[in-house]
Amino acid sequence: MTQTMPGSSEELVELFTRHGIDKQFFFEQPSQVIELLLANGDEALETDDFQLAEHSYFDALQLAQKTRLLGLEASIKNALSGVMDMQGKQIEALHFVEEALGMYATLQDYRGQAVCLCNLGGIQATLGQFDVALDTLRSGLEVAKSIDDTRLVMNILLNIGLNCVEAGLFENSLLYYREARELAILKNDHDIHANCLVNECFALLSLPIERHSMDIFEQALKVSRQHNLTNLEIEALNNFGCYYEQIDNWDDALRYYQQAHQFAQNIEYADGQLNAVLNLGKVNIGHGDPLRAAEQLHEALRLATQLDRPKSRRDAHQHLARLYKQAGQLDLALQNFEAFHAEEQGLSSTERDKTTRTLMMQFDMERAQTQTRAEREQREHAETLQARAEEQVRERTAELEQTQMEVVGRLAMAAEFRDDATGEHTRRVGIGAALIAESLGLSREFIETLEIAARLHDVGKIGIPDAVLLKESKLSVVEFEEMKRHTLIGGRLLSGGKSEVLNMARQIALTHHERWDGNGYPYGLTGQEIPLVGRIVALADVFDALMHKRPYKAAWEKVDVLAELARQRGRHFDPELTDAALLMFSSGQYEAALLQDSQVASVSTSSEITPADVASYQGALHWELEATRLQYEQLLESRTRELEIARYQAEVQVEQLRRAAFTDVMTDLHNRRAFETDLLVFAEQAQHHGRPLGIISLDLDNLKHVNDVGGHASGDALIILVAQQLQQHFEPSGRVYRMGGDEYVVLLWSDPEQVSRELVGEIGRLETELERRGHSATLSAGYAHWPDDVAQPEHLLRVSDERMYEQKRRRKLRPASLPVTPSTVLG
């Protein structure tokens, strides 16, 4: 069955209307809507409405794919595999269960993998591939044992036993039934215990009589009765009847078959009634009441026809033919014999069709596997070509960015020479901005980029007339409006860049004259609306402008400049940044950095630009500037055009690969690989700046119980909800990662003592929020911080994990009568 993704809003609306779903609710709670569709499919399946179940599952699948909920998508594909198998569509069933298995492997969801392997083994058994099915089921068993999921282990053992019976391996089946039975007794699981006993009895009935054990038959009946498992009790009674029939104890056989029939009638268990009444009729033919046998066999025939059980219809006709022959009613005997023969032929034809279909399916599977191998080889070849293309794009992009930087840098220098004969203003602003950023604890990469980008803050002055730019008196209103345009001109000159430096430089050029109180230009931004880089450069720019002579003003004393910055705290400048800048400019760091930078420049430069050079240069500047601007625009246009197509294709693929590599698909959190990368970076920064660094390890205690009770979709929903809540609780001062399964880690760079004080309360509030949303879930947590708990930050995870597992151990040892309260093992 082919379905398409709802690619437009109209298709989504039609899907929502079909299921009576509120559109807004879907966008707020997509997982709940998808789980509702799953439940609709399950309900349809219970009534054998396979088409409705299939449609519901496909709609749920489309929404799960649209919202990128991989865990739910895997659950739905597993369900689709089941409904396809029930309809005899084993190829489609194999397709879906194998896709689900791959998704669970990606998610490192071992329980999901084990369930899929169990289902895959069942499909393979249906196709008659008993050896392959047993291998698959045994693989599922190993996975289930590795995660210590005892109930899943018992179910898989039971399925392996049933598969052995289908393959005629009755002795082997007993081994698996007994292993499952021992676990069921250990775990006090009465349902599986009774199932194992009943199926063990059925297998024994196919073995020689000396292998039969009356004790097993009695246990099966006793356990079923003790725990009100009536369906299993009926099967146990039928097994007892078969046992006594095999040893020619007809009276006891009739007694047990009659009990089974009575119980099956009481609970309207149609298959139980059919088996019991067919056995009663068979025994009554020669060892009871022939008239009663006729009634019972006709009742069996009616039930077999109603339930569409061809083998039971065949057996009923065979026994009726024998009964009527003994009674001398040869016409009825012949009539039933012919019906028996027709049913037998139909079953033989069905078996032949099944064999043919199985062979065709095997052929289709082999063809599909061949195609998959070819596609994989083609994909690997394409990935190799893509890697080469990406390398070429990186090289050409770097070349383009270097060209952009050179042209823009020359424009900035040309503009600055008009306003500052030495050209030193841009250098000093870059150094000042970098020092402010460093005092804020920002990353080294950010600081280095800012130092370069800040030097381009006034590049737009190249478009301002000399009469305005070099005017020594106060500008008129019109002139000031003209001067303000340099921010927009700079933004336009720096637009279209692909590098971080040029993008940051554009932000700075546009916003370094905005004010904290909203009275700046060109956009009148206020407070945090102004980008951080614009707020930093505003301080560095004003400080340098006041410290040095300009055509319209004399230089100020440093003490007066610092006093002015302090006065403008909260008006012109960001208060927090102002405090950092005042501390830095007062410390002597700034002057030392300028001196060091000048010494480096003097070593690396063979000649200096003198005032005479500048005067000569300015004579021809008017014409050269326009030519430079045109040259810049033409260069960028010609070089960019040839790269854009290759860049776009490569960037899309690279971003997908990057996201897949560092993002947990189910929760959209950072994954283990991202954590390991970030820990190295933050550890280096912590050691360099002497700042503390902390890690919280968290584990969702009862995810297994949630999966067992509510299904895997409920477990996925809980994992996603916990991820969202952790982000809300911790991300203002840290970063949250999903390490796999039910484990999370929070990387913190805030005060460790404060974290230690507040962590228990945070976990408690998080558990309360989960309970409010319908999940009775608890979290175990352990916290460790550097430098108090470990010598090296890289060892934090080991210590926090140990403390988290210690808390889990304490919770398990806590008496059941005591209330569970949030408790966290702290450093």
Image (cartoon, rainbow, N blue to C red):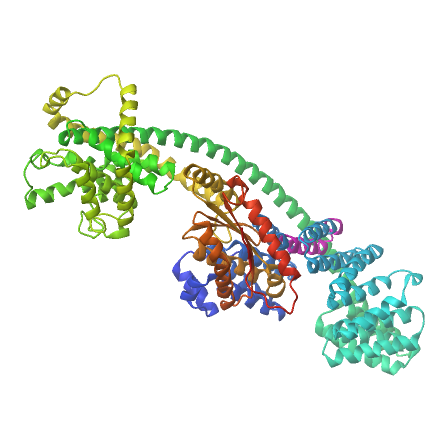
**In which quarter of the view is residue 255 placed?**
bottom right
> Residue 71 location, x and y as percent?
54, 55
Q: Is residue 624 above or below residue 377?
A: above
Considering depth in this image, is 747 or 687 the residue closer to the camera?
687
Q: Is residue 115 magenta?
A: yes
Let me know if residue 603 appears in the view. yes
Q: Is residue 303 left or right of residue 542?
A: right
Number of numbered callouts drawn = 0
Residue name at image x 26 percent, y 16 percent: 606
Q: Is residue 686 left or right of residue 451?
A: right
Let me know if residue 498 appears in the view. no
Q: Is residue 525 left or right of residue 309?
A: left
Looking at this view, name the residue that lies furthest to the top.
Answer: 606
Considering depth in this image, is 731 or 808 the residue closer to the camera?
808
Q: Main secondary structure of the magenta part?
A: helix
> Residue 16 location, x and y as percent?
44, 66
Residue name at image x 61 percent, y 53 percent: 805
Q: Is residue 758 left or right of residue 78?
A: left
Residue name at image x 43 percent, y 49 percent: 750
Which segment is the magenta one?
113-132
> Residue 507 location, x and y as percent?
26, 42
Considering depth in this image, is 21 or 214 the residue closer to the camera?
214
> Residue 642 location, x and y as percent?
33, 32
Q: Is residue 386 above or below residue 773?
A: above
Considering depth in this image, is 229 or 453 the residue closer to the camera?
453
Q: Is residue 223 magenta?
A: no
Tell me the quadrant of the picture where the N terminus can be found.
bottom right
